[in-house]
Image: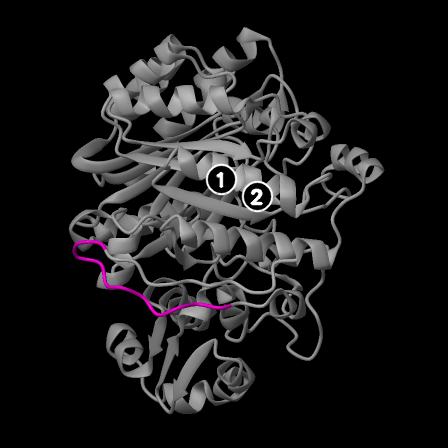
Amino acid sequence: MCDRIRRGGYGSEGVKRRESLQVAPEQILRYAQAGPRYTSYPTAPMWTDTVGSTEGIAALKRSRSAQEDPLCLYVHLPFCERRCLFCGCTVEITRQGEKVTRYLDRLDAEFDLQCSALGDRRQVIQMHWGGGTPTHLSSAELERLFSMVERRFDLLPDAELSIEIHPHVTTDAQIATLTGLGFNRFSMGVQDTDPEVQRVIHRDQTLEDTQRCVETCRGHGVGGINFDLMYGLPLQTEQTFSRTLDAVASLRPDRLAIYGYAHVPWLKKAQIVLEREGLPGPVERANLLAQAIDRLGEQDYRVIGLDHFALPTDSLSVALEAGTLERNFMGYAALPDGSRMGDMLSFGASAIADVGGAFLQNERTTASYEAALEEGRLPVARGLVRSLEDNLRRAAISSLMCRMHLDLDELQAELGLQGLQEHFAPEWMRLAPFAAEGLCDVSPRRVDVRPLGRVFLRHLAMVFDAYLDHDSQPNARRFSQTV
C-alpha cells in the first residue's frame, strides 16, 4: 500500500519551489463521494429542456455586447470505429464515410445559424476539437472542417488550437495536416498501458503507438502535449499502474489528467461488461490515486488542481503561479498574455456553449442534431439562463478553482456587490472542517486553498453550491466520484 504521498519542491526558472504535499490514502477514501466537477455552475443536472433554440439565439445576440472579448470555440466530432468500454462521452460507432460527410454538412449549417445571431464578434483565442475521435476524419475532412471555421472566425495569432487524438488510429499524415493548419496542442487518450487492462476496456493502443504520436508531434514543433490516464479500471493494481505511470512519464507529456473511472451503466450500458472483470473498490481506488500523485511528483509534475498535473515549465503551472489560470468546459487553460476567458461557442451533437449568460447544450444524438438543422433551427435541447445569484456563486467557485483563493473584497469589486461576508456566512462555517484538515486557510473575508486542497478542490467548491443539499450526500447517479 502507498502509505502517503511525498511532494517535495522542485526548481524551475520563473516557478517557485513548493512546500511538501502529503496525502494519506485514508484521507482520499474519507473524501470519496459523488460531486460535480464544476465545469459549469449551475451544474448540468440543474439545466432544463425549457431552454431551446429561441433562448439560444437570444443568448448569442446578448453576447454581441462583449465585442472586444475574444471567443473560445468547441467542435464535437462523435465518431469512433470501436467503443471503448470505459468511455462516458457522446460517441457514435461507425465506419460509414457518408455519415461523416452528412455531419460536416450539418456543422456548416450550424456555423451559419450561430454566426448570423452573433453579429460581428468573431475573434477567437482558443479552439478545441473533441469527441469521439476527431482523427476518425480523414486529412481532407479535417481540412474541410478547419476551412469552415477559418472563413467565419478570426483565429488570433497566439490562439491555442487543440485537438483530441487516439494514437492507435492517428497517422503521421494526419498530424502533419493538423500542425500545418496551426494546431499547437494535442491531447492523447492513454488510460492505461497494461495489455490486460487494455484488453478488458477494448483499448487497442500500444506504448509504441503513443510514443510515435508524441515524436511526430514534437518533430512538427508541437510544444503542448497532454495525456489522459484513468484509475479505477478493471484489473488495475498498484503494480500495473506503477508501470503505466513510469511509462507515460518517460514520454514527458507537458500535462497529464488522471481521471477516476466513472462507472455509470445506467447511462452507458456498455460499461456493464466491465463488472464481470471486477472493479477496484474504494480502498484500491484511493491507493491508485495516491500512487499517481506520488509518482508524478517524483517526475516533477505539479498538482494544478482537481485531476490535472503539469510540468513546471508548462503554461498551466506558470498561470497558476501568476493567478491567471482559467477554466471552462474544455478544462483548465492558460490564455496568452493573461487574457480572461470569454464566451464559449460550441458546435456539434451534445456540444455545450457558455454564451450570453446562458448554458446551451445541443441535441445529444447525431440524428436529432441533424434533424434540427434540417428544419433550419438551432439544435439546442436544454440549458439554463443564469441568475445574478448564480453568477455570484459561479465567480466564487471559479476563484477557488483557478486562483486558489476567494477574496470577498476582490469579488465585491469585480461584481459591484456589497454585503458578501454576511451573504456567505453559512459557507464560511461549512469551510471550518476543511481548514482543520489542512485543505485551506480561512480568515473573515478570504479563503486560501493550501497545496493539499488542490487534490480536493471539488469539495471546497461544493460548499458554495446553492443547489446541493448540504445535509445529505449528493446523488451518485447525478455526479461522478470526487476522487
- Please name the residue shown 22% across and 45% down the image: 70
Residues 150 and 460: in front is 460
Residues 411 and 232: in front is 232
User: Which residue is denoted by mark 1 in the rendering?
Assistant: 246
For residue 362, say whether it is visible. Answer: no
Is residue 107 depicted above or below 355 in this figure? above
For residue 121, say whether it is visible. Answer: yes
Label total for image: 2
Quadrant location of residue 235? top right
Secondary structure beneath dot 1 equals helix
> What's under tag 2, amino acid-wise?
Ser
- Please name the residue shown 27% across and 43% down the image: 71
Find residue 425 and report its horizontal and vertical position in percent. Answer: 47, 89
Label 2 neighbour load within 10 Å: few <14, some 14-19, many 20+: some
Query: What colour scheme was applied to this rendering of the protein?
Result: one colour
Q: Which residues are magenta?
A: 12-22
Are dots 1 and 2 in contact, CB under 8 Å?
Answer: yes
Find residue 250 and report its horizontal and vertical position in percent. Answer: 41, 35
Is residue 319 depicted above or below 115 in this figure? below
Find residue 8 and report its horizontal and vertical position in percent. Answer: 38, 63
Rounded to the nearest angstrom, the CA distance separating label 1 from label 2 is 6 Å
> What's under tag 1, amino acid-wise?
Asp
Which quarter of the figure is the C terminus placed in?
bottom right
Find residue 400 and report its horizontal and vertical position in percent. Answer: 40, 69
Residues 11 and 353: in front is 11
Residues 60 and 213: in front is 213
Secondary structure beneath dot 2 equals helix
User: Which residue is denoted by mark 2 in the rendering?
Assistant: 242
- Please name the residue shown 46% across and 15% down the image: 137
Quadrant location of residue 195? top right
Residue found farthest to the right: 276
